[in-house]
Image (spheres, coloured by chain):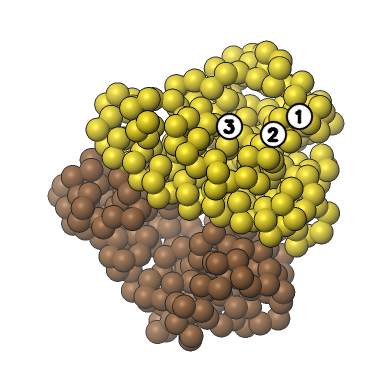
Chain colours: A yellow, B brown
Amino acid sequence: MQYALYYWTGIQGRGEFVRLALEDAGADYIDMARVHGDAVMQPFLDGGSEGAQPFAPPFLKAGRQVIAQVAAILDFLGPTLDLVPQAASRRVQALQLQLTIADLVAEVHDTHHPIAASKYYEEQKTEAKARAASLRSERLPKFLGYFEQVLAANGGRHALREHSYVDLSLFQLLSGLDYMFPRRMQALAPTLPLLRALQERVAKRPNIAAYLASERRLPFNTNGIFRHYPELDAER
Amino acid sequence: MQYALYYWTGIQGRGEFVRLALEDAGADYIDMARVHGDAVMQPFLDGGSEGAQPFAPPFLKAGRQVIAQVAAILDFLGPTLDLVPQAASRRVQALQLQLTIADLVAEVHDTHHPIAASKYYEEQKTEAKARAASLRSERLPKFLGYFEQVLAANGGRHALREHSYVDLSLFQLLSGLDYMFPRRMQALAPTLPLLRALQERVAKRPNIAAYLASERRLPFNTNGIFRHYPELDAER
């Protein structure tokens, strides 16, 4: 089946978690907005198209089905793309882990928008600085320490004892945080050996390595979810 | 099967979305922390118990399985409790809607904690006031307007053309927002006729009505997710 992925042009954003799964599996997909422009998403967001109405991008069209929300898309794609264990009990565990990744991603987003998603970062810089301090010192060690524990409990190499979309999302999470907080992430690295090794292994998977070297992989930038503002990173 | 629900005592919080599903279905469950105290959750959170490690409550124990994250728990319970349509395409749609509810709940939480989850509301009141203004004027109409559209597109009475856990969660979402922002929600009511009617119908479901009248239903309070601080509601 050919999938149609709908996500904003110009950024990796939340769409990247889906893109990495499609790329890793070698799935046939079209990145619709990159081909046709962002306006191609509007009829879906307005509720005027066939299939369930998405609240926001990313969403995926698979035949007549429309699925929004990263974790729901990955839960849907997992079995077909062989990116989740077959047992139902493991599939729900993958979903649980993905949702915890999504929670951290939401906190990352809000670090740049602590007051209002509709306002620019520059309009809420003071509050962003305070929130970034909390993210760096409290939330990152808590979340990343949790994922490190999950890897340890599952044999050390995977979040779910075998390759899955969760591993791909952990790769993206760490890569985004490396861009966002290079100093802080370097300081945390010694406490996260399993996550760091996983990140390197995922980057070397043939389809992922090819994707990362392609023009389809946009660089991180300060319009996306993970943003690098030096003033928000830790002191040297 | 007897389920064990683990969630903080003293508040409805995120656990209430799971509780409502268990109550509506008449499921056999024990609210573990209410019986044994909050400390009963710690071994799970430390990763020392059988089953997948949760990042945070709520989590559910079903036989040997441990499942965390509200949306994952409801996705798991849905088919067994007959609280989700049987078709896989509708089940993923339920998950997508539940995740959008979860997104708004996270924004509600952050309204009281715009700078740091670890700090008290009283330590971030100024920022909370600014964030609440954005939630009231921009985010609530956007999210609730979306759910109103979803109801309209599905026949008007349900989020998914038949009763599901999503309807129960929409009831809880509206009830929480009514407590949090009574003035703002009253002003929005005329734009949300289908959601308001759904909320009333859910409250009258026999098992839900019995639950709401029981001592098991804690009142909303300012320790939970939905908090009423008059200064954050709209002007009269």
Residue shown at the point (51%, 27%) measured from the top left: A179
Q: Do the residues labelled 3 and 1 touch (CB within 8 Å)?
A: no
Check the residue under mark 1 and report the chain it is in.
A
Q: Residue at x 47, y 46 (%)?
A: A140
Which tag, 3 or 1, sits closer to the chain's start? Answer: 3
Q: Mark 2: which amino acid?
A: Glu
Looking at marks 2 and 3 on the same chain, the residue that comes earlier in the sequence is marked by 3
Q: What's the residue type where badge 3 is placed?
A: Ser
Kind of element beneath mark 2 = helix
- Mark 2 on the same chain as mark 1: yes
Residue at (15, 50) in percent of width and height = B236
Q: How crowded is mark 2: few (under 14 residues within 10 Å), some or many (20 or more)?
A: few
Give the percent coordinates (x, y) of residue A227: 45, 27
Direction from residue B23 to residue B105 in the image, left or right: left
State which chain disc 3 sits on.
Answer: A
Q: Do the residues labelled 2 and 1 touch (CB within 8 Å)?
A: yes
Image position, residue A94 (x, y; %): 69, 52
Q: Is mark 3 on a helix, strand or loop?
A: helix
Q: In which quarter of the image is residue A163?
A: top right
State whether residue B94 is above or below residue A206: below
Alpha carbon separation for disc pair 3 and 1: 14 Å
What residue is rendered at 51% in x and 62% in y?
B56
With respect to residue B88, does B223 lie above or below?
below
The residue indicated by pointer 1 is A204
Residue identifier under label 2: A200
Dividing the picture into quadrants, the one containing residue B72 is bottom right
User: Element at badge 1?
Assistant: helix
Q: Name the residue under label 3.
A: A175
Determine the CA span between mark 2 and mark 3.
10 Å
